[in-house]
Image (spheres, rainbow, N blue to C red):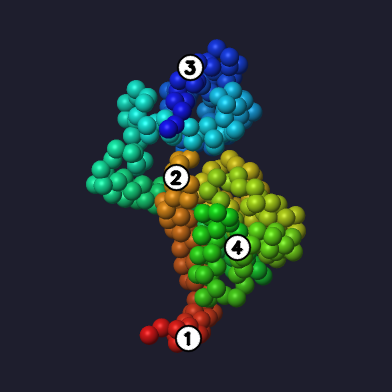
Amino acid sequence: MTDDIFAKIRTCYNQFTKAEKRVADFVLQKPEQVLYMSITDLADSCGVGDTSVFRFCRDLDRKGYQDFKMALAGTLASGREDLEGTQMAGVVGPKDSLEDVVKKVLATNVSALHETYRLLRLEDINTAVEWMIQAKNIYFFGVGGSMVAALEAQSRFMRITSKVHMTIDLHLQAMSAALMDKEDLAIAFSYSGATKDTLDVVTKARSGGAKIIGITRFTRSPLAALCDLRLLCGANEGPMQGGSMSVKMSQFLLLDLLYTEYFKRTYDVSAKQKAATAEAISNKLY
């Protein structure tokens, strides 16, 4: 069972400050949009500060903004709110048929790829690849669902270069970041841009002079503020969809672009290295 967050907002409305009421009005008018907004996005849309949004969430007896979005998603999915279009396009509801599920999952994944494409800046891809070519070492960082993308990045690039590094141990990630210098490059994956462990390693890498590339969803986030370059993935992930495949697919699209362009620009060396690594594992296949 999920709490009816709309009823809670209405019962608490008179207790809100003027700034909190602006947040409440926006949430009641555009709940589907709020699901995919960061706390800063919502604050900017309401013309208030992040702290006002946080206080609004706490006044609703929520631990924080993510907890509030979980309750909002639960209310929308339960169908208890009399809003048109409660079941949002691409978001699976408990009453959906298998056919509906197939169509929505397909639409979500296709939409993520198309939006990532629309967000692409060719100059940023060009710069990222140049930094990768020039770097002495490239470290991929990520935790949780984004760790999958970081591991895939290592798997792809280690076929053509020996200067890529990634570890799943968070302590070792921190140690690696602490030893990075101005000749190194860090590529951090984080959908929210607010994962504490990722921010920690990026801060350490930055303090040593390393360049930072962030692959993330939001242009305004703690990670974005630390990065020298941002590559935006276009997937919309609701609070009940943590680790969704659409996010990974959008991250993989960016990764594939970086790999392909890197291979193209370093073709002679990369082709030789790829042949060597392919031969190294050839006896593992039937």
Q: CA distance from mark 4 to mark 2?
A: 22 Å
Front disc: 1 or 4? 4
Q: Which residue is mark 3?
A: 10
Task: Sort mark 4 into few (<14), some (14-19) or many (20+) by Cα contacts within 10 Å.
Answer: some
Residue lying at 60% horizontally and 16% vertically, measured from the top left: 17
Q: Earlier in the sequence, mark 1 or mark 4?
A: 4
Q: Quadrant of the C terminus?
A: bottom left
Compare marks 4 and 3 and give the one earlier in the sequence: 3
Mark 4 touches mark 3? (CB < 8 Å): no
Query: Label 4: which residue?
Result: 168
Q: Is residue 172 above or below residue 62?
A: below
Picture coordinates of residue 282, whole percent (x, y): 44, 85
Please tell me which residue is depicted at 41% across the width and 83% down the height of the picture: 285
Residue hosting label 1:
279
Task: Residue 275: tell me if it is visible.
Answer: no
Q: CA distance from mark 1 to mark 3?
A: 66 Å
1 or 2: mark nearer the eye: 2
Q: Residues within 10 Å of mark 1 (few under 14, many from 20)?
A: few
Q: Is residue 60 above or below residue 144?
A: above
